[in-house]
Each structure stands twice: as structure tokens, then as C-alpha cells.
Amino acid sequence: MKVDETEWKIDDEYMEAKRMFLSHVKEINAAFVFLRDIIEELKHIADYCDGTTDYVRIFAVVRENE
């Protein structure tokens, strides 16, 4: 499904951002920390969206079988 693919892509981008932060660890300042937190929260949002679509799929199957 499209949501799953998008969530996987976000996971990949998240890991790339983490690698980027680690490669610039000597240059980290408050802006980097703030940006890191934003990126982490965006990943959590993508995870929640993926979980929500799983529930919607379950409800759809249950209703279809009623």
C-alpha cells in the first residue's frame, strides 16, 4: 500500500539524517539539536500514520465479513 511505502521511505530518510548528524558531531549546535528533534518527531508521525492505516484495514475487513 502507498502508506506503507511512504513510511518505509521516511524510515530510510530518517536513518540517512541520523548518519548525517553523526558525521558532523563536532559541529553540532542548538540548531542541529532542534532539527534532529523535528526529524525524529516526523518519523514518529509517519509510524503513527502507518499504524492507523493498519487499524483501518482491520476494521474494513471486519465490516466486509459482517
Image (cartoon, rainbow, N blue to C red):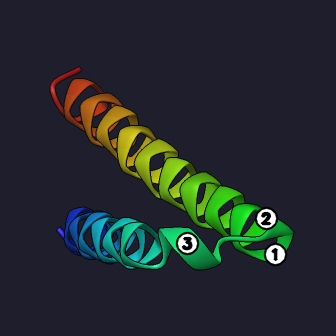
Q: Which amino acid type is shown beneath numbered disc 3? A: Lys
Q: Are marks 1 and 2 in contact (CB under 8 Å)?
A: yes
Q: Residues within 10 Å of mark 2 (few under 14, many from 20)?
A: few
Query: Residue 59, percent across and down?
Result: 34, 30
| Mark 3 vs mark 1: in front | 3
Q: Residues within 10 Å of mark 1 (few under 14, many from 20)?
A: few
> Residue 26 bears which disc, if any?
3
Along the viewing direction, whichever of 41 and 23 lies nearer the viewer = 23
Q: CA distance from mark 3 to mark 1?
A: 13 Å
Along the viewing direction, whichever of 21 and 59 lies nearer the viewer = 21
> Residue 60 bears which disc, if any?
none
Q: CA distance from mark 2 to mark 3?
A: 16 Å
Q: Are marks 2 and 3 in contact (CB under 8 Å)?
A: no
* The N terminus - image quarter: bottom left
- Residue 4, relative to residue 61: is it above or below? below
Task: Specify the quadrant of the image occupied by residue 56.
Answer: top left
* Circle nearer the N terminus (3, 1): 3
Instruction: Report helix, strand or loop for mark 3.
Output: helix
Could you tell me which residue is drawn at 50 percent across and 43 percent down?
48
- Residue 36, relative to residue 62: is it above or below? below
Q: Which residue is mark 1?
A: 31
* Circle nearer the N terminus (2, 3): 3
Q: Which amino acid type is shown beneath numbered disc 2? A: Phe
Instruction: Report helix, strand or loop for mark 1.
Output: helix
Could you tell me which residue is drawn at 38 percent across and 39 percent down?
51
Could you tell me which residue is drawn at 63 percent across and 53 percent down?
41
> Residue 34 bears which disc, if any?
2
